[in-house]
Image (cartoon, grey):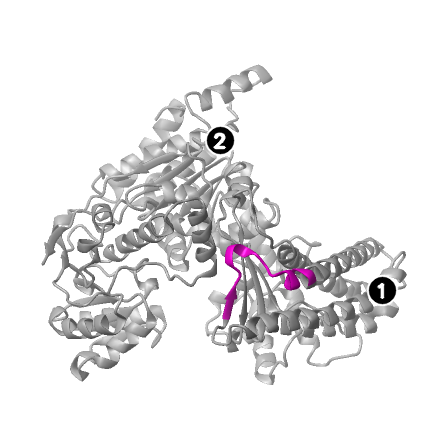
């Protein structure tokens, strides 16, 4: 393990050997390979501060030695490690050792709650107890998981409202709260006071409806705001303090991205001080695209502007008394009204465009180019939102100055309400400024640079608005490179499916990871010959959806004859439902269908049925093709209805495909085939979950055998036995 000190090498080996011995595990080649790769990656950063460095010359030598032999980008590693490798042990042991030795913190981010809970409640306690390593750890959740005492105070005040109360928060101009909810709030307060509850939603003994819970949580503007008046009594504050004190932090990808959006080092330690592990790392690029996308719902935005205007009219007497704020406070109501009026023109222009496509609920602008008329009204919006943002910043600064005055007395609480409200308005103004600036600049790009995806949606009962504007990157590579990879002390990204078609190229392209980053596929302990990958003779091609569904229906009764568990995966909800509806009643009674129950409840019922000695079949979509652990008899047969190609109507993927075609490349081969290959590997990975498992995978799609891309996808699959007809 070059680049490591002898003491670090010894510490990693001793911890691993002690864990293997105490847990009576068999050392695995792939696990040892991964431990070495993680340790070397965490050693390959230029931020190493040697404990023996007593002067600048010695310190410089230590820095030089720590990176000797490493090219740029070697502080980042991509590691594909299949099920059974023991990834958690392989990154926690070297991660803890290296973090302690080099004065860093270890941050482990996952894509799913299930893996976070496994780390916190099972894996990390076991590693700490068995390895001889002494470290503390914490689970960092988003602000919406914790009760905020300041918000609880505000909500309880509403039970006896007065004209002085202010309810001015973005997306939170609160709905009416029921008497039952107020009774629950009182119980929560009593439980907090007695120490029977810690303010974590997940630890409340009963389910809490979102509409009851969300008014109690801190808004985003409070994350980096003034210190909370409740201090250590506030569960949200305690959670944040716990993050600052922990040596190992477990969280989700989204919260890491939220911290980066705030500049880094606000929620978590600074990237320069952090050793990152992104487990389920193949999700990170898409998570980043979603996190930094922009959205404006015209209907709700106009309502919000109207409510803000009314609130500021009521608050003008107080705020205009603050030094230097009279002009800004007086101008604000008219600015809000101007924005609302201008949105009518936006709505009119968009409605005209949508009328040209009456059968579509979504209108994507090819190559991200926005029609001139819509660009013009977007430019007006950008100007107005920019003016509003400047005014809000002025008011926020004035309130901040006023709150530093020790003579405020009773007005302090009211001004603190206004401070949070104004901070929330600033966030929404900034978000709108980004979106409308993006639409105003939606012109054709002639330099071959990446476009942004821009589109409209109409209808959508769940959106609460008739018309939505969307803008998004098509790749998050540049953002992740500048905000994370160029700043992180070191980072490891790992997953069972980091590669596509056996290569890391697609992930590097999507994530912005340096091309010189470490790349490693570690050996799996599984004997894949215990599983069979079958493609039966099929008459129907999946492109003929009706004929293919009929043939799937005809074949399923013979495929689902096992007395154990089976998993049937579909690429579309329509086909899933059509196949289920067409099954004989006897077979329908064995099926647990996605959406009929929560995922957790469905898996629980499936396991209970198999434990009782009966057959059980799960019908699922993409979410059941990864992250589902059904070892042994829980899953002896995985049936895949057809190759899981990405949905072609996704505006982001469609815009990226256009750009690839403009570069003279084939978007189907560059995007669709690698993604289908990766998804097929994920789906096939549901079969063998332990070294003792065996069973069968059946793909009801012969395109792997008849199309030119088929052999490349087949070659990327694990070496199952093959049964092709």
Is residue 363 a member of the stretch shown in magenta?
Answer: yes
In this view, the residue in front, 468 or 336, is 468
Is residue 638 a member of the stretch shown in magenta?
Answer: no
In this view, the residue in front, 587 or 524, is 587
How far apart marks 1 and 2 lie (CA) works out to 53 Å
Q: Residue at x 43, y 29 (%)?
A: 43
Q: Is the N terminus in the top left, top right, bottom left or bottom right quadrant?
A: top left
278 to the left or right of 27: right
In this view, the residue in front, 604 or 293, is 293
Q: Residue at x 61, y 64 (%)?
A: 148
71 to the left or right of 525: right
* Residue 432 lies in quadrant: bottom right
* Residue 640 lies in quadrant: bottom left
**Number of marks drawn:** 2
- Disc number for residue 559: none
Q: Is the C terminus in the top left, top right, bottom left or bottom right quadrant?
A: bottom left
| Mark with earlier residue (1, 2) | 2
Q: Secondary structure at mark 2?
A: loop
525 to the left or right of 131: left
For the residue carrying disc 2, how many other residues have a C-alpha within 10 Å: few (<14), some (14-19), or many (20+)?
some
The residue range painted magenta reads 362-376
Comparing labels 1 and 2, the label whose residue is closer to the camera = 1
Image height of 487 relative to 688, above or below: above
User: Mark 2 highlights which residue?
Assistant: 102
Q: Residue at x 83, y 53 (%)?
A: 401
On the question of residue 191 being in view, the answer is yes
CB within 8 Å, label 1 to label 2? no
- Disc number for residue 331: 1
Query: Which x, y percent locates residue 590?
Result: 20, 77
Query: Which x, y percent locates residue 179?
Result: 60, 84
């Amino acid at each position: 393990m070059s680049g490591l000190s002898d003491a670090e090498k010894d510490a990693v080996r001793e911890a691993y050997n002690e864990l293997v011995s105490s847990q009576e595990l068999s050392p695995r080649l792939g696990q040892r390979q991964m431990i070495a790769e993680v340790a070397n990656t965490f050693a390959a950063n230029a931020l190493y501060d040697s404990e023996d460095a007593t002067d600048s010359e010695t310190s410089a030598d230590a820095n030089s030695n720590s990176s000797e032999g490493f090219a740029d980008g070697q502080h980042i590693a991509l590691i594909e490690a299949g099920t059974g490798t023991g990834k958690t042990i392989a990154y926690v042991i070297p991660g803890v050792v290296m973090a302690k030795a080099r004065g860093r913190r270890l941050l482990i981010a996952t894509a799913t709650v299930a893996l976070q809970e496994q780390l916190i409640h099972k894996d990390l306690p076991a590693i700490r107890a068995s390895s001889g390593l002494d470290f503390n750890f914490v689970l960092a959740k988003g602000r919406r998981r914790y009760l905020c005492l300041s918000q609880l105070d505000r909500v309880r005040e509403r039970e006896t409202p007065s004209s002085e109360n202010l309810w001015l928060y973005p997306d939170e101009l609160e709905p009416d709260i029921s008497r039952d909810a107020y009774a629950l709030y009182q119980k929560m307060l009593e439980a907090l006071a007695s120490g029977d509850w810690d303010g974590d939603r997940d630890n409340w003994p009963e389910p809490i409806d979102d509409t009851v819970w969300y008014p109690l949580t801190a808004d985003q503007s409070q994350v980096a705001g003034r210190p909370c008046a409740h201090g250590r009594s506030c569960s949200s504050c305690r959670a944040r303090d716990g993050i600052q004190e922990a040596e190992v932090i477990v969280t989700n990808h989204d919260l890491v991205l939220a911290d980066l959006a705030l500049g880094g080092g606000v929620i978590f330690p600074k990237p320069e001080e952090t050793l990152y592990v992104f487990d389920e790392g193949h999700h990170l690029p898409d998570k980043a695209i979603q996190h930094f996308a922009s959205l404006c719902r015209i209907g709700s935005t106009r309502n919000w502007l109207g409510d803000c205007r009314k609130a500021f009219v009521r608050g003008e007497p107080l705020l205009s008394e603050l030094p230097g704020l009279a002009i800004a406070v007086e101008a604000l109501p008219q600015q809000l009204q101007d924005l609302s009026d201008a949105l009518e023109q936006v709505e009119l222009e968009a409605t005209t465009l949508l009328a040209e496509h009456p059968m579509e609920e979504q209108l994507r602008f090819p190559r991200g180019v926005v029609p001139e008329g819509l660009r013009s009204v977007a430019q007006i919006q950008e100007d107005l939102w920019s003016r509003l943002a400047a005014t809000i910043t002025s008011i926020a600064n004035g309130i901040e100055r006023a709150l530093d005055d020790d003579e405020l007395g009773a007005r302090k609480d009211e001004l603190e309400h206004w401070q949070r409200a104004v901070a929330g308005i600033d966030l929404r103004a900034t978000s709108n400024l980004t979106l409308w600036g993006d639409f105003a600049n939606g012109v054709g790009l002639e330099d071959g640079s990446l476009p942004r995806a821009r589109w409209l949606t109409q209808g959508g009962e769940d959106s609460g608005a008739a018309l939505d504007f969307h803008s998004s990157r098509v790749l998050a590579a540049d953002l992740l490179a500048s905000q994370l990879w160029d700043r992180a002390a070191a980072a490891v990204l790992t997953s069972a499916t980091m590669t596509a078609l056996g290569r890391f190229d697609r992930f590097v392209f999507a994530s912005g990871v340096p091309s010189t980053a470490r790349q490693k596929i570690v050996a799996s302990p599984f004997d894949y010959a215990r599983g069979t990958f079958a493609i039966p003779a099929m008459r129907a091609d999946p492109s003929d959806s009706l004929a293919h569904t009929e043939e799937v229906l005809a074949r399923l009764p013979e495929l689902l004859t096992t007395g154990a568990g089976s998993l049937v995966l579909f690429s579309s909800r329509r086909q899933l439902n059509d196949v289920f509806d067409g099954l004989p009643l006897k077979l329908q009674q064995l099926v647990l269908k996605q959406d009929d129950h929560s995922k957790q409840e469905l898996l629980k019922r499936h396991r209970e049925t198999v434990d009782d000695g009966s057959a059980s079949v799960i019908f699922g979509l993409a979410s059941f093709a990864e992250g589902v652990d059904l070892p042994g008899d829980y899953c002896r047969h995985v049936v895949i209805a057809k190759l899981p190609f990405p949905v072609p109507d996704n505006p982001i993927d469609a815009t990226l495909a256009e750009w690839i075609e403009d570069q003279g490349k084939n978007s189907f081969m560059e995007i669709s085939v690698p993604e289908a290959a990766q998804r097929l590997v994920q789906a096939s990975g549901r079969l063998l979950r332990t070294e003792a498992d065996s069973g069968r995978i059946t793909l009801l799609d012969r395109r792997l055998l008849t199309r030119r891309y088929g052999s490349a996808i087949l070659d990327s699959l694990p070496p199952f036995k093959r049964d092709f007809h």
